[in-house]
Amino acid sequence: MKHLKFLITILAFPLIIISACRKDPQPLPSEITRVEPEPTSAIKGFYLVNEGNMNMNKASLDYMDLVNGIYTRNLYNQVNPEVTKGLGDVGNDIGRYGTKLYVVVNISNKVEVLNVKTGKKIGQINITNCRYVTFSNGKAYVSAYLGKVGDPKAPNGIVAEIDTTALKINRTVEVGRQPEEMAIIGNKLYVANSGGYSPPDYEHTVSVIDLTSFTETKRIEVAINLDRVKADSYGDLYVTSRGDYYTIPSKLFVIDTQSDQVKKIFNIAAGNLVIDDDYAYIYSTEWNYIEGKNKITYNMINVKDETIMDRKFIMDGTEKDIKVPYGIAVNPISKDVYVTDAKDYVSPGKLHCYSPEGRLKWSVSTGDIPAHIAFVN
Amino acid sequence: MTQKHSAIAGKMRFFIYSSILWIAFLLPLNSHAQTDSTKKATQLQEVQIREYRLTEQSKSPTPVQILSAEDLKRINSLSVADAIRYLSGVQLKDYGGIGGLKTVNVRSLGTNHTAVFLDGIQIGNSQNGQVDLGKFSLNNLEEIALYSAQKPELLLPAKGYASASSIYLKTKEPDFEKNENQKIELGLKAGSFGLINPSLVYLYKINDKLHASINTEYINSDGKYKYRYTNGVFDTTAVRNNGDVERFRLQAALFGKLRNGKWNVQAYSFLSDRGLPGAIVANRFDFTQRIWDRDFFVQGSAEKKLSDKFTVLLNGKYTYSYQRYLDPDYVTTTGFLDNRFKDQEAYLSVSGKYRISPIWEAAYASDYTYQTLDANIYRFAYPSRNSFLNVLSSSLTLEQFNVQASVLSTSVYDRVKVYSSSGNKQVFSPTVMLSWKVFKHHDIRIRAFYKDIFRMPTFNDLYYTFIGNTLLRPEYTKQYNVGVTYFKNFNNRKLKFIDIQSDIYYNRIKDKIVAQPGANLYRWIMYNIGLVDIRGLELNAKTAFEPLNHLVVNLGVNYTYQKAVDVTSKQQETYKDQIPYIPKNSGSFLAKLDYHQWHANYGFIYTGFRYNQKANNIYNYMEPWYTHDAAIGYEFKLKKGSININGEINNLLNQYYDLIPNFPMPGRNYRLTLNYKI
């Protein structure tokens, strides 16, 4: 009897902790943050894709309602709770075309097509290892790392043409290895080949695709490990090279699409850029071996006369609060600049809004690795 | 200042609450012990061998938890990883299935701070410093022991002093009755996931001074099991693919006796071919990646008492491990991504113990290790490392008091064939531990230890292409532990024994090595930036009783509380958030019933909610999980030998859960074991 208490304690133990049970499964909730509304904003708002870490299945979609000043974090799961495992793993790009929103989810091998007003899923196009999306003439173009799956002799990537009404792949064209971002000027699509799967044997060209015949007509020599491609309104392309992360630094190149040749090299590190009217907004994060840490730079280029400007898009010193700039967009009407901070990649990120004068207007918390923005008007 | 004050107050509160909990547990037992003590005084000396290890647990100045061969046979486990889940303070990282990587994290310090020893010699991995415990099966093991801090013995190789916690695996040593000269044990396991697992243990007596053992095992499994994901709206059940495993292990050993000593040598080979099931993410359920492993080692050990006062221990080992990783989803200019890693290690250790007086001993151990890694990856540095470990230790053993202290010197010299090396490092690490038997006639002990140790950055941390950072410093841990143990053996009584251990601890990890982003997702870099504060409480209780004649019931319960918070920077929004994968509450319960030839057991494991990334928010929340495992068996006595049949059901309530997000664990599954012994 003296030991009864002890025995009861031992036997009761499982019962005690069973009470700390699992909850009924529920779709992940949204979270709302308020910022200063802009009732007269011509741009209603924008969608933001958070990439999420690989294998975590944490790609998420947020929406910023600029008119009412409401930021909704994790909209997708609320609107589309029936989609198995949600948006998926590593959101890599987003684009709006007409009334549809296209989200490229890299590891999940899919392009999700959503209603731009509601975020409701309309359809899905499966493309293995898809990277970026761009649009022209009723078609969406998606770059993908792999053309043929399971063929060791087929290292080349593709660009797929998607009919935006039928939401089906029409045609595909083989390009260089591990193609990244694309831009369209006239009837030509330009895609940056990286070759990132076979270092040090990187690709060093931009593939040119004729959109009528949908064939690769040529490759333009630029530099190794190309990544971003943006078109300005003067028929030029701004292409970034990531370098080899060791001895060859990141650089920015300008291609004249009349001659399809590099016409200017900016010796500045360029991780990502956006072009709005005559200005290119550029940031870069580069590892510095000597200091053993990242070096972050912000730059602006006047694309009309192709010169680096004295002006910066963050002027109030708040750039020091950004740990890793990871996404950038410029409001085409108000000229506000949105910069995302991926921080340490494993914490929720931040979205900062800067006025055209470079002053911080507001900041909100996002999902993990906030990266890609598409405006809604 | 106010911040600092509240931190101290928090620490105080934690210790006060813990003390109250202890007192509540100890009071009734203590008063009982006093009333019965005189009658039991003589019986206490008659502690049987069966309880020998238990008393060792309660005497140890460092917390130790032991699973004996008997336990291992009885708990539903296929590998060391399965069994170790029942121990307190342990979080298993398990990617699911038989082939999935299984590593342990003891007291929230991280996988790399736990060393795994096989028969006294460490199992190394220069590449990532992690030992996959799923590779080690239980059928040839005599014991698994988990020590926090270190094994409280003096005569150890220096490596025994060099990690924050240690797991000792001990293989079966041949042991013969007078008139026998061989023993055979044939086993066959079969069950869910298409598991077939035949094994053989053969022990042979060459002569009185020389015994041999051979043991071998083959595992084949298709690794297919159902898993389910749901958010209440979607509800998807699918079958895990690419989880097939084929493994073969062959081990041979010689055990010899010397005058005043003993020696052994063993050779080990392990071949494995398996699929690598990936993360189950939206729209992606099937995988094609594969891994091949070839592990081989020879090791030897000799211990001899050279005089009444002086004992010497020699250890040596050579290891060769080869791993090939094939990813058909990753097509390079030379075909599929096909990485090969060759890891080699040579190890030599000399230890000596000297008895200065009957109560005072001192020991010195010196270890040398050479490691080298070869890989066919771009910009590989081909690193090699020479490590010298020297440790001076001493112990004082009085009737009711034992104290042991040591200081370890670690010197590491890294060399690379190309690019830059991380250079040389030299660190001194002290440890102090003590055990105090409070009353002369009762086995109530207070124990305490302080250990300051570190882990070296691994070759991957330093040199892996794009990720490695040669500027890394070691990652340091400090551990403070205070505990109480109580053991009482009751002979010829309904109640057999009671064993209670409880400890509270405070750990701090400084310069934690964490991957941080570089310019993009391809370019993560290792940094020394983490600072983690860990406060924990562990409670283990075991008892055995005989409620009816011949029905013996063994019960054991473990509970762990851990508050492991990230205190790296106050500027971070995750400041003071619980670190990933560490539940605040976890525990296990184990019951064993024996009745004549029948035996049955039931195990319950609970892991509370935890977060899978730094921020403690709803998006990173992981549900608690708890599994019930049960088994029943019968032993047929034959004219010669015996046959044991055991049927197991694991995860009885078919709970679907993940330990690592998107790597589903199996639901309800079955195993049948046949064991024939002659």
Image (spheres, coloured by chain):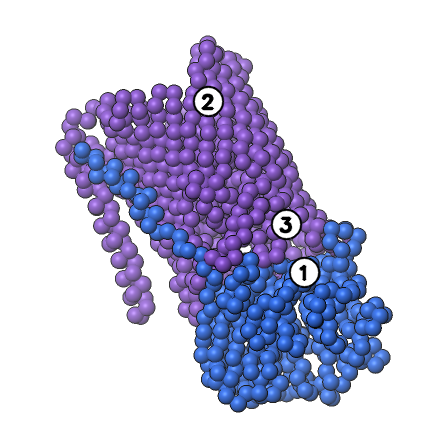
Chain colours: A blue, B purple
The image quarter containing residue B212 is: top right
Q: Are marks 2 and 3 in contact (CB under 8 Å)?
A: no
**Alpha carbon separation for disc pair 2 and 1:** 53 Å
The location of residue B12, given as percent across then percent down, is 26, 58
Q: Earlier in the sequence, mark 2 or mark 3?
A: 3
Q: Are marks 2 and 1 in contact (CB under 8 Å)?
A: no
Q: Residue at label 3?
A: B286
Which chain is indicated by disc 2? Answer: B
> Where A79 falls versus B59 (above or below)?
below
Identify residue type, mark 3: Asp
Identify residue type, mark 1: Asn
Front position among marks 2 and 1: 1
Badge 3 marks a residue whose secondary structure is loop
Badge 2 marks a residue whose secondary structure is strand
The location of residue B146, given as percent across then percent down, is 42, 39
Q: What is the count of numbered marks?
A: 3
Identify residue type, mark 2: Asn
Badge 1 marks a residue whose secondary structure is strand
The location of residue B77, given as percent across then percent down, is 47, 35
Which chain is indicated by disc 3? Answer: B
In the image, taking residue B257 as reference, residue B601 lies left or right, namely: left
Image quadrant occupied by the N terminus of chain B: bottom left
Q: Residue at label 2?
A: B644
Q: Residue at label 1?
A: A126
Q: How dense is the environment of label 2, judged by Cα within 10 Å: few (below 14), some, or many (20 and up)?
A: some
Q: Residue furthest front?
A: A166
> Where B257 falls versus B4 (above or below)?
above
Which chain is indicated by disc 1? Answer: A
Q: Which residue is drawn at 35% across and 54% down?
A: B535
